[in-house]
Image (cartoon, grey):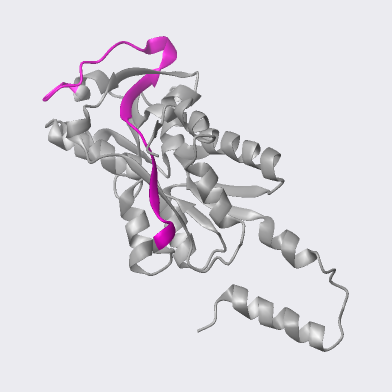
Amino acid sequence: MPTRRQCLASLLSAFAALGFTCLSATAPALAAEKITVFAAASMKNALDAANAAYRADTGVEVTTSYAASSALAKQIEAGAPADVFISADLDWMDYLAGKQLIAPDTRSNLVGNRIVLVAPKEKAKPVDIRPGFDLAELLGDSRLAMGSVDSVPAGKYGKAALEKLGVWSTVASKVAGAENVRGALALVSRGEAAYGIVYQTDAAADPGVSIVGTFPQDTHPPIIYPVAALSESSNPSVAAYLDFLKSPKAAPFFQSQGFAFLK
């Protein structure tokens, strides 16, 4: 079955055969150079900076849509047009791979991250994150902000860590779920939640919060952000863009935000 892009190309060819010449010869090339990226919300600061540098070097525009990896994967499955997907976990990239919606030979692991406990800056005090630590008492009558534990990668990592530490059952009823990790961060920054579990890169991007503890890496699955081109993309600019993201030129944009560069 032909893809949407192939159908469009056939339609344009048919118009040309009928003598419609209002489209300039350069229009298809310009359209092809614009790259559309769907990326996890936690990538925003680093990826915006990397994309600005890429455009300055190449003249190629990169448009990015940020949201929870789960929401983006479902949009791609529903036919949303995009060229590149960057997920905050392996599961949602695997989900699209299982539906043959990514080009497998373009897939790679781009960066890594950590999850941390944050509090509003003016109320922040260090928390010893260890097995059985009394997070419920720390919360009191307030809430624990997290990404949705059923779908948002940061929420799933956070729940896994709390389960491993033996405290999930004591705080599950106090969780304020957010549609993405930036939403959870905002709840803490505005003082609407006493604590939150977010990526350390998000915490560094918001002056309204402070990191009060870091979850041991052995309490949750490795936090890895994979990147891949989508199988329906025929954009000739994508390969060079992916090469750039994995290159030493892009590394500082991710490292400055606290990501571990995996290339």
Q: Name the quarter where the C terminus is drawn.
A: top left
Q: Is 249 displayed left or right of 86 in the figure?
A: right
Segment colored magenta: 105-134
Depicted 252 relative to depicted 7: above or below: above
Examine the rendering and report whether any part of residue 190 can be seen.
no
Of residues 64 and 211, the one drawn nearer to the viewer in this rendering? 64
Residue drawn where x is 54% and y is 64% of the image = 80
Residue 188 included in the magenta stretch of the image: no
Of residues 248 and 14, the one drawn nearer to the viewer in this rendering? 248
Residue drawn where x is 51% and y is 43% of the image = 245
- How far from the left and from the top, in percent, is residue 137? 20, 20
Q: Quadrant of residue 262?
A: top left
Q: Quadrant of residue 176?
A: top left
Examine the rendering and report whether any part of residue 132 can be seen.
yes
Numbered circles on residues, count: 0
Residue drawn where x is 48% and y is 67% of the image = 231
- How far from the left and from the top, in percent, is residue 54? 63, 41
Depicted 149 relative to depicted 215: above or below: below
